[in-house]
Amino acid sequence: MHSFAFSTTHIYSLTLIYPHFLDFPACIRYYSTTIILTILEYYKEPMLKSNIITIDGLGPVLFTTSLRAKYLSITIKPDQTVKVTIPKRVSLTTAKKFLQSKIPWAKKHLNRLQKLQQNYAQTPLPPINKSKAKTALTTRLNYLAQKYGFKYNKIFIRNQKTKWGTCSSKNNISLNMDLVRLPKELQDYVILHELVHTKHKNHSKKFWAQMDKFVGDAKRLRKRMREYRLGVG
């Protein structure tokens, strides 16, 4: 029989998934891969595809298992729904403990969202002239592209619900017409963000260095963008 020694990293990963792993005798930890996984399967809590569970301090929370997720994550939607996404091999118990540790964070953002909704409810936004918005944003995009030496393929101005802008793999840029409601500095931040994505397809250090070159402190502006939420109101 070939032995299989677990590294510290393996043990840490397994204790996250199977809380009883470190209670096993040392000899069991060095059994063959097949045997150890068979034993661990005994301790594995059944996974839920999707379920709503009431959590003290938060109320109903949607727990859902994702085959593509690599990490536990918490999402707070505009309608104040709290969702916990669980990777395939993480137990529901672990997901609950993770959420419990993040309750102060979740409450903070729920309160922030409520205030934003109240502000939007008290101050109705005027309708956007779609034609003028398209002309203004296209003109500004072309100006900034020419000024900083960027090239893009096509431009689309849309009424998007979740994103201020996107840049596709083919360098097609899509801008949200609600950008015209933002201060000019933030409009330029979003437009340049997508233009820089024509050269850097991720948010690497090179991406942020180039953004800083054009707008100064780019991460300061990114933080300001959080004051303007889409899908609210």
Image (spheres, rainbow, N blue to C red):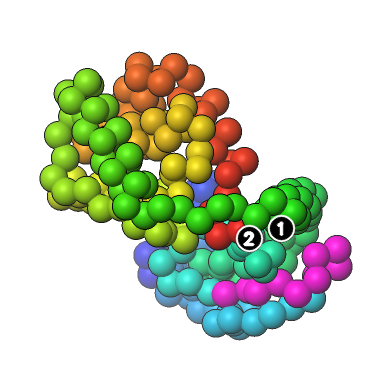
User: Do labels 1 and 2 touch, CB within 8 Å?
Assistant: yes
Is residue 197 visible from the viewing direction of this image? no
Q: Nearer the viewer, residue 179 or 190?
A: 179
Asked if residue 156 is among those painted magenta in the image, a careful observer would answer no
Q: Position of residue 144 (x, y in %)?
A: 26, 27
Q: Is residue 60 magenta?
A: yes
Residue sitting nearer the eye, 24 or 40: 40
- The vertical placement of 230 against 39, above or below, is above
| Kind of element beneath mark 2 | loop
For disc 1, the marked residue is 121
- Earlier residue among tags 1 and 2: 1
Question: In the displayed structure, does residue 207 sit left or right of residue 97?
Answer: left
Q: Amino acid at mark 2?
A: Gly
Q: Residue 56 falls in which quadrant of the image?
A: bottom right
What residue sits 34% from the left and 47% below the top?
132
The disc at residue 233 is 2
The residue under the point 32% across, 39% down is 136
Residue 67 place in picture, x, y as percent: 43, 72
Q: Quadrant of residue 62?
A: bottom right
- Characterize the local packing of mark 2: few (<14), some (14-19) or many (20 or more) Cα atoms within 10 angstroms: some
Amino acid marked by disc 1: Ala
Could you say where residue 219 lies in the image, as x and y percent from the top left?
50, 28
Instruction: Point out the image quarter for the N terminus.
Output: bottom left
Query: As displayed, is residue 59 above or below residue 46?
Result: above
- Span highlighted in magenta in the image: 55-64
> Which quadrant is the C terminus positioned in?
bottom right
Q: Residues within 10 Å of mark 1 (few under 14, many from 20)?
A: few
SS class, disc 1: helix
Q: Position of residue 45 (x, y in %)?
A: 64, 79
Q: Vertically, is 178 above or below 140? A: below
Task: Judge from the rendering whether residue 48 lies leftward or rightward of residue 118; answer left or right.
Answer: left
